[in-house]
Image (cartoon, rainbow, N blue to C red):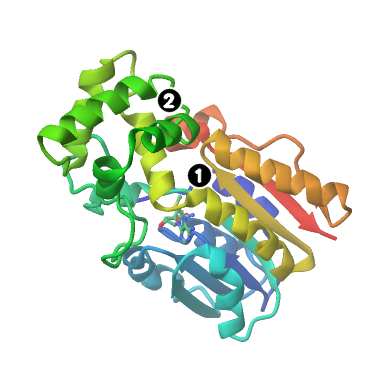
Amino acid sequence: MHKPVLLKEVVANIRIPAGGVLLDGTLGGGGHSEAIANNAGGKITIVGIDQDSIALKKVENLLGPIAGKLILQKGNFRNLDKVLKDNGIGEVDGIILDLGFSSDQIADSGRGFSFMKDEPLIMTLDDSPTEDVLTARDVVNLWQRENLELIFRNYGEEKRARKIVDAIISGRAKKKIETSGELAKIIEGAIGRRGKIHPATKVFQAIRIAVNDELGALTEVLPKALSVLKKGSRLAIISFHSLEDRIVKRFFREKANQGQVILINKKPIIADEEEIVLNPRARSAKLRIIEKI
Ligand SMILES: C[S@@+](CC[C@H](N)C(=O)[O-])C[C@H]1O[C@@H](n2cnc3c(N)ncnc32)[C@H](O)[C@@H]1O
C-alpha cells in the first residue's frame, strides 16, 4: 500500500471549506485526498485524476463514503482544466500534485518501473497505453546514441551515461532488450556496483521521465492549476528530484514576483527523520506551496 509523503504538512496547508472542491491531480492510493477530506469543515467534492485506472478503481471505496461528491477521471493532469469544465466546475479550493509514481505501481503494475524485477519494459504511468504510445522498450531499443545519452544525463543526472549507452547499444545489437531485469543487468555490467544505491536507479528514472513526458506535463499544468484556483486558496506540489523541483520553484517565484501569489514557504518543506525511517521514499520529497491572491 502506498504511504503518502509529507501528509501532515499537506493537510495543514490545504484546507477545504465545507462544500468546497479539492482537486487531486495525482490521486494514486488516495492518501492525501482522504486526509484532506477528513480534515475539512464538512463534506467536500473531490476531483481525482490519475493516468492509472487501476489506482482510480482501488480508491473508489476509500473516498466514496467520505466525499460529498467524488469525480474520478483517468487522464493526464496536464488536462485538468478540461476535466473541471466537463464536470461544470469553474474554480477549486485547493490543489495537490504529488508527482511521479506510487509504490503500488512499483510493486505490482507489471510495467517495468523497478530494476529489482524482471517485467516487460513499458514504464507508462497509463496502465492501458495504446499501441502508438512511446514505451521504455522503444526508447532502449530504437533511440539513437545521442538521444539516450542526452536523457540519461539530463533526466537522470547520470555522469557515466556514455559507458551505459555503449553497453546498451552493443547489448541490443545482439538481442532486443525486453525486460527491466535485462536492462538492469546491462547497466550493472557497464558501471558495476558502488555503495547502496542500485547502479540502474538514474537511468530508470530518466527513461520513465522521457516515456511519460513528465517535465512537459508539469510545465503545462502549472499555469492551468493557478488559473482554476480560487483567490485565497492553495496549490501544493511534492516533487522527488531536482529537475521537477526547479520547474516548480521557478514558476512559483515568477508568479510571486508578478504579485499573483504568495509563497507559503520560501524553502521547500522536507520530511523529518521519523518519516524517512518509516517511508524511505520521503527522503527525496520536497513540498512547495503557494496561495493565490
Ligand atoms: C506519488 S503517487 C500519488 C500518491 C497519492 N498522493 C497518495 O496519497 O496515495 C503519483 C500518482 O500520480 C500519477 N501521475 C503521475 N503523473 C501524472 C500525470 N501527469 N497525470 C495524471 N496522473 C499522474 C501516477 O500514476 C501515480 O498514481
Q: For residue 54, which quarter of the picture?
A: bottom left
Give the spatial CA distance, label 2 vs label 1.
26 Å
Give the number of the disc on residue 158. 2
**Which quadrant of the view contains residue 169?**
top left
Viewed as shown, does residue 144 lie left or right of 80? left
Quadrant for ligand 1 reads bottom left
147 and 152: which is toward the camera = 147
- What mark, if any, has residue 5 been given in the picture? 1
Q: Is mark 1 within 8 Å of ligand 1?
A: yes
Q: Quadrant of the C terminus?
A: bottom right
Q: Residue at x 33, y 66 (%)?
A: 58
Q: Is residue 77 left or right of residue 151?
A: right
Point 87% across, 52% down: residue: 258
Side (left or right) of 146 relative to 190: right
Give above or below for 226 relative to 286.
below
Q: Farthest residue to the top: give it.
A: 194
